[in-house]
Image (cartoon, helix red, strand yellow):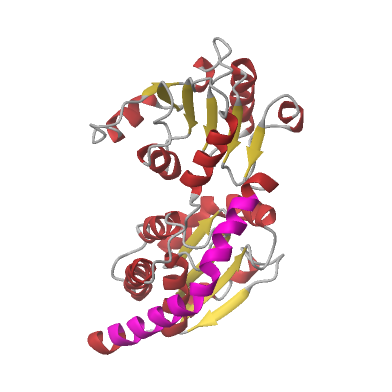
Amino acid sequence: MSRLLGLYVDHQITSPSAMALRSAKIKPIANDLARNGILLVATCLRVEAYGEEPALRNIDSTIFSDCSYERIEGTPAIAQRVAEIASGAHSQILGESYISDQLAKSIERLDPNLPIFRIVRLAVDIGRASRKRQQFIASFNYDQIVREIIADRFQDDVSPDRLYMVGAGMLGRELIKSGIGERFRSTTIVTRNPKNLRKRLRPWTDIEVSLIRPAEMGSVSEPQSIVVIATTDVNNEYQNVLQNAIMRLQPRAVVDLSSIPVLSDTAVMKLNYVTMYDDEFLQFIAENNKKLAPKLPAVRSDIEATLLTAQIATA
């Protein structure tokens, strides 16, 4: 087996906004890389590639040619980093839970017989377990931050009307399952493909949601409603459709969790609009990280010890 290699750039090396743009540009080639035995981890805050050295030899000239990046070599170093990522130790929101699911989904593209597949899968399991063992769990995860923003917007006696969730991907579904719509009269998922989504939501026997297409939103204004945008798959056409619908709706607030904010500057001026880059959102992240940062050394040590034991057990 050739030596394993990892190349990565993340939000700790460059800005989160620059990282989001890079990730969106790279994501479409994930399947092509997987066919060549390369694992691509492309989230809003990182672009990382792992595989055998011959396969990665020219990757820096295609993915990382115009930026500074880090290089790690060998199974122990790669397993340690991936496990730490899965634990939330390298997330912008320390201890957040979504990253391990994103890693697991990235692995699915690979041939399970590849060494990098087995190593990364083991690392993800170890990172998840360490997060629980060390109680490295975000007090302000994405769902809790959205709850806090909603509570702030409804401090008066007016009851919330409807929660609109734009996007039916992993983040959108997890937010709804977390119960953020409990205060609202109803919850509506805005999706371009209601038929496919209905099939995916069949297991949701205890959660009531309605589905509409983007153009159907905003038939009347709803000043006591909230829109949460939780999708990254937005082209120019879809952006215009969403923006026009939201402008017609005139909700009390729009919380945009997209790594690349959806609404234009013109629309933002007319709406109560919060993105992940605004001070209100960042203050919650700072409060969370202040509490969890002291636990980072214990998490890393726990992962290192567990990996060592796993290597001995599987040697």
Observer-nearest residue: 182 or 216? 182
Majority secondary structure of magenta residues: helix
Which quarter of the rendering shows the N terminus?
bottom left
Q: Which residues are magenta?
A: 282-310
Percent across and percent down for residue 48 are 53, 66
Q: Is residue 174 magenta?
A: no
Query: Is residue 220 among what the camera can see?
Result: yes
| Above or below: residue 69 compared with residue 184 | below
User: At x 44% / y 44%, what residue is drawn?
Assistant: 171
Percent across and percent down for residue 89 are 50, 68
User: At x 37% / y 59%, what residue is drawn?
Assistant: 104
| Above or below: residue 236 compared with residue 79 | above
| Above or below: residue 250 compared with residue 140 | above
Which quarter of the rendering shows the C terminus?
bottom left
User: At x 34% / y 25%, what residue is drawn?
Assistant: 195
| Above or below: residue 34 compared with residue 146 | below
Q: Quadrant of residue 285?
A: bottom right
